[in-house]
Amino acid sequence: MAHTDPYRLAPADGRDGAQAGIGPADVFGILLRVALVISVIGNMVFSYGVADRGAHLAFGGVTAVCVTVLVVRRLRSRR
C-alpha cells in the first residue's frame, strides 16, 4: 500500500525522495533581480545626492542591462 503524505504539494516523482532543487537558470534569475534592486537603489541615491555623475550613469546602465536581460528571458521562456 502506497504511503501518501498529506503535506506534500506535488506528487513524488519516484526518485526515492530526492528533490529537484533549483537550477543554474534560476540562480541567474535571482541574481539578476538582486542586481536590479541594488542598482535602482544606488541610482536613486546618486541621483538625489551630490555625488559624481559617473556613478549615477553606471548604476543607470546596470539597471538598463538587468531590465533588458530579464525581459528577454521572460519572452524566450514563453515560447
Image (cartoon, rainbow, N blue to C red):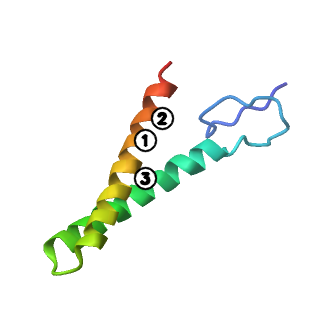
- Identify residue for label 3: 33
Q: Please, is residue 71 above or below residue 47 in the view?
A: above
The residue tagged with tag 2: helix, strand or loop? helix
Q: Please, is residue 38 above or below residue 52 in the view?
A: above
Amino acid at dot 2: Arg
Of the two numbered discs 3 and 2 in the rendering, the one whose residue sits closer to the viewer: 2
- Identify residue for label 2: 73
| Residues marked 2 and 1 touching at CB (< 8 Å) | yes
| Residues marked 3 and 1 touching at CB (< 8 Å) | yes
Hey, which quadrant is residue 47 in on the image? Answer: bottom left
- Identify residue for label 1: 70
Residue 74 image offset from top left, x and y in percent? 44, 32
Q: Please, is residue 2 above or below residue 9 in the view?
A: above
Earlier residue among tags 3 and 1: 3
The residue tagged with tag 1: helix, strand or loop? helix
Tally of numbered discs:
3
Q: Residue furthest front?
A: 54
Q: Residue furthest bottom?
A: 50
- Residue 4 at least partly seen: yes
Q: Residues within 10 Å of mark 2 (few under 14, many from 20)?
A: few
